[in-house]
Image (tube, helix red, strand yellow):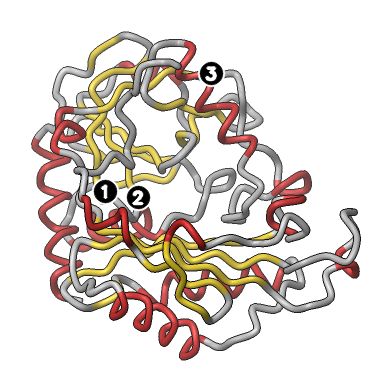
Amino acid sequence: MPDHRTTTHDAEHDPRNDDILIYVDGALKPRAEATVSVYDSGFLLGDGMWEGLRLHEGRWVFFDDHMDRLVSACKAVSLDIGMDRAGILAALNETAKANDMTDHVHARLMVTRGVKVKPFQHPSLSRSGPTIVIIMEHSTPAPETRRGVTLATVPQVRGLPMSQDPKYNSHSKLNCVIACLQAEEAGADEGLMLDPHGFVNTTNACNFFIVRKGEVWTSTGDYCMNGITRQKVIDLCRANEIPVFERNFSLPDVHAAQEAFLTGTFAGLTPVAALDGKPFPETDGPVTQRLRGLYEELVAAG
């Protein structure tokens, strides 16, 4: 087995997670007993959508934003969630209460098209309604991620919307898994993925930003996950007179940057130490630190 590499989802070990209860279609089951059918659409085909949510001091951070993304994605692929937002919130709160969780918690909410009557592709074979699973863990980002993750530019690209739209937070993540494997083979923690035109886009797991001469740059957003933390950082830049640009840029622009960071629900802002073996002048530099502080204030304000 390869040595464990740092990832943006590394968390401090918490033994309480060994005995968590997991929500499976309305029932709370011990971790070892929380299973779904091998005929489930998510297992057979990756046919489902998911959201990662953060529980902070008893509140689900940016809950409405996450529900907007989930509902619109499910609607686009004709996947009936089977419950409204109030029902989803109740299920999240039920699971959190059962696990005695109030803070430093990450939840993965998964919705698939449900169990099929035959192990084939057609959606009409899923006839029993959706499968809904919530995995909730005590989760605090590992301190070593603050020292910066390393990236490698990978050949796997983020595709065009007419193939599989990258804005879908779908269970079909093989494209990103391949990028992650390519980064690991290059000796890096995560893969920096380009768009179909060769412009810098995102990593296999998070949205990507650079800082050049005090300006914050990120991709146009056309070929990346419509990240909620990404959008909050863009909004914070605009509200605090930090120049920010959603634009096309290429690898030479990245190598000329002073700082780089990633955004995601779990870790917030994670600094990048190097790309393709070339260190950035500053890891967790002043702009990254300022934006992290502003973001944490936004989370705390609810």
Rendering coords of residue 117 (x, y %): 88, 66
Residue type indicated by callout 2: Gly
Q: Nearer the viewer, residue 50 or 148?
A: 50
Label 2 residue SS: strand
**Secondary structure of residue under mark 1:** loop
| Residue 182: mark in rendering | 3
| Mark 3 neighbour density, 10 Å: few (under 14) some (14–19) many (20 or more) | many
The structure residue drawn at horizontal position 37% and vertical position 76%, both measured from the top left corner, is 95
Q: Residue at x 24, y 39 (%)?
A: 270
| Residue 20 image position (x, y, % from top left) | 34, 63
Give the amino acid type for the residue marked by disc 1 in the picture: Ala
Q: Which mark is residue 7?
A: none
Q: Is residue 116 left or right of residue 107?
A: right
Q: Which residue is mark 2?
A: 264
Question: Nearer the observer, disc 3 or disc 2?
Answer: 3
Name the residue beneath numbered marker 1: 267
